[in-house]
Structures are given as structure tokens and as C-alpha cells.
Amino acid sequence: MREEEKIFAGILFAPGHPDLRAIKLRTHNLNNDYNATYEDETEKRAAILSQIVGSMGEGSFIQGPVHFHYGVHTTIGKRFFGNFNLTIQDDAKVTIGDDCNFGPNVTIVTPIHPMLPGERHVMLDKDGNEKHLCYAKPVTIGDDCWLGANVVVCPGVTIGPGCVIGAGSVVTRDIPANSFAAGVPCKVIRPITDADSMRFKPEILADNQVIGE
């Protein structure tokens, strides 16, 4: 089994394997290319992003700088907005739905290292060779989610559609759809309902209007 296949199978893999290092080196260099562009160089930016990520839907925008690890293991839906310093350590697959918005410094991580120091340093592979090994779990974020500034999403987490995650949260467990969740560790505060509509905040709505009224 190839090392990349081991990642997707959820078993230990060697992040220093030449095949994986080649993917990461390519992506890290492309990160640098993207981060060296100006914001209005839209065609150049789009061309670089198309080489970094597995796929990204139309109407999406990433402010930059960006920090993808593998890049090709990430899929992003339509009309995504990612603010400054988006970091996605996508050893395992990262899936982001349509119409998601991320505040500054959002980080998504998928790799997991052994808890015991000796096992973090080295283990033996099937041939008895000493290797640095870890494993990874995928992250999924549903449609219409808003992640506030400095949110960290940990390995194996699924955030259901329609969620709002408060700034500074560390999401260690799944969050059900249409929830407002926050904290360290992140916990559901309450469901998001029609009572949260801006039409009930006339002092903020001012002379604007909610569509559909």
C-alpha cells in the first residue's frame, strides 16, 4: 500500500516518505507563489489555486496568505470566502461545502501523533525499519457555515451545515447542523433559529431589508 493510501485508510504512515515530501514541497512552493501575488491579480491567483487544491467552486475567494500542506487533499465548494492566514493541514481529506465563510487565522488540522514520546520519535514499520509515523482523520464542514477568527478544527471533526463557530474556538467533536457553538473545547451553545433573523434587530438593520419579507 502506498503511503498516501495509508493516510486515507486511517492507519500509520510515514510523513517523511519521498512520495509525500514531493507533494508537500510542490504545494508549499505554490503557497509562496500565491502569497507573493497582489489581490487584484485575480487570474494569476486563480491559476495558482487550481494547482494547489483538489477542487474549488466558482465564486470563491481566499484573501491570503494561505498555508496548505498537501492542498490536493482539500476540496472547497462554491462561493467560499477565506480571510487572512487560512491554514489547512490536509494530510487526510478536508471537505468544505458551499457558501462557507472563514474569519482570519482559521486552522484545520488532520494529522494525529502518538501520545507517548518514544512512539512520536520512532516506531518500526512492517520491515523493521525505524520510521517517524503518524496517522490522520478527515475533516468535513457542511454548507453555509461561518467560522470566526482563530477557530481551530481538529482531526476527524464534522461540522454540520448552517453552523456558526465562535471566534477562538477549538473544535474537537462533531457539531450538529444549524448550531451556534463556541469555546475551548467547542460546545453547542444553542440552535440557530428564525429568531436570529436580522429583521428582529431593527436598530442594526437600519434602512436595509431582509429578502423575502
Image (spheres, rainbow, N blue to C red):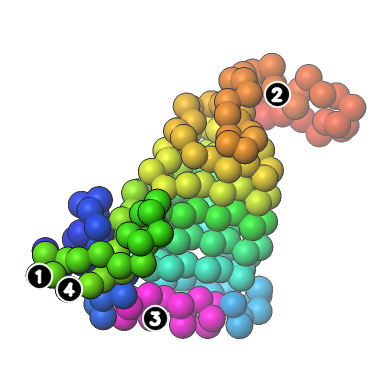
Seen in the picture, residue 74 relative to 208 is either above or below; the reply is below
Q: What is the magenta range?
A: 20-34
Of tags 1 and 3, the one toward the viewer is 1
- Quick check: 178 left or right of 89? right
Of tags 3 and 4, the one toward the viewer is 4
> Marks 1/2: CA distance?
60 Å
Q: In the rendered image, which residue does mark 2 sit on? A: 197
Q: Dot 2, crowdedness within 10 Å: few (<14), some or many (≥20)? A: few
Which quarter of the image is occupied by the N terminus? bottom left
What secondary structure is found at the residue carrying circle 1?
loop
Residue 62 shows in the view: yes
Q: Amino acid at mark 3?
A: Leu
Q: Amino acid at mark 1?
A: Asp
Q: Amino acid at mark 4?
A: Asn
**Of pointers 3 and 4, the one earlier in the residue sequence:** 3
Q: Residue at x 42, y 38 (%)?
A: 158
Q: In the rendered image, which residue does mark 4 sit on? A: 129
